Image (cartoon, rainbow, N blue to C red):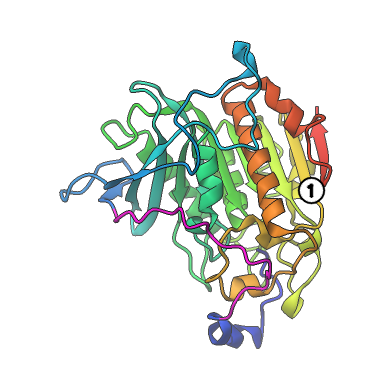
Amino acid sequence: MGWRALVGTWIASLVAVTALGCGDDDGAQTDGNVAEVESGADVDADGDADADGGADVGWEVAPDVEAEEGGSADDGEAPVDPAAPGPFRWTVVDAEVVRGSRTTPVSALIPDAPAGVAMPLVLFLPGFQMQTAWYLPLLERIASHGFVVVRADPPASLMSSSHPEQARDAAAVLDWAFAAGGPLAGRVDPGRVAASGHSAGGKVAVMLAFADPRVTALLGFDPVNGSGPFGYTADQPDIVPEQVEPLAIPIGLLGETTDATAGFGGQACAPADQNFLTFYEAATSSPWVASWELLGADHLDFVYDTSTCGLPCSFCRNGAADGGAVRAVVETLAVAFLRRHLLGDTAQEAWLVGDLLPAEVLMQHRP
């Protein structure tokens, strides 16, 4: 989120109301399918586990989905429906990636593809003061379609958050993911990597894509080119257009404009001059770029569990659209984008920019 207006007496209110509920009243919650998995071994940025042993592994099953091979238009079968769960089950690996004094918890969802099959990697980063676990149903849906999904929570505090450091943390997570002998060795394809994130996490994903050539696609969920309470600084830099214009990779940007204007406390969660549309306008080098405005949605409709969000969520407006319906569209577009640009499934264009695009989505696309 943007934090330009949180000054003066608001600083004192931060501590006082952190425990309050969120501003989104559509009752978004996780669906109870999140597994309890113990923490794994500490892992440094080179992918080496500490002496305590390897990361713990737990078994996850995509709800109501049989582990069968899905069809694709590319092999003569019916196109894969991105609105439906995919055919894969997955295992979960939890670990910590250590970079100097910074520790990033990570959790990888690894589909049960045949041994020796290297799958595309999707790295997901959360919004400001949010946790990747709050987006788990979206990430599970993506994993069910055959993507290794790594959710990472780079360290940040309410009063101190460095976007460049978080981008370097994300790069260290990629190092861990591709480390020889690591838990993902042989399971991830280093030539097919998507960086993704919500809100401030979407901004950090852009910064990662700008700095790291391993990123081959970018997917932002209502990304915000946010600043600190006193404007842009070295820790919260302005990256649009400088870090967006050079990106010569496919880019998908989902967003909303309900939170383009100020809500509670005079703060907009996704200000118009920092929102997803500014990223789209700046992405002039991308060979394929699209923006999807989800009409009536709000910034928190992208989050599945806001029950413990507290102060960061209380500043956001509540949109007219049903949160569950918005999240269903988000899942469809995310899967379609990743299948199109990491799996080469051209039939997904129908859902992204064609006749199957939901009517409640306002789309722009280049070329």
Q: Is residue 32 magenta?
A: yes
* Residue type, mark 1 in image: Glu
Who's the residue at 65% across and 33% down the image? 336
Q: Quadrant of residue 155?
A: bottom left
Q: Is residue 349 above or below residue 304?
A: above
**Which one is nearer the viewer's eye here, 99 or 345?**
345
Badge count: 1
Q: Name the main secondary structure of what is drawn in magenta.
A: loop
Q: Is residue 213 magenta?
A: no
Q: Quick one: quadrant of the C terminus?
A: top right
The secondary structure type at the circle numbered 1 is strand
Query: Magenta residues, as a range?
Result: 20-39
Q: Give the left or right position of residue 162, taking residue 358 as reference.
A: left
Q: What residue is disc 1 on?
A: 293
Q: Position of residue 74 (x, y in %)?
A: 62, 14
Q: Position of residue 251 (x, y in %)?
A: 68, 36
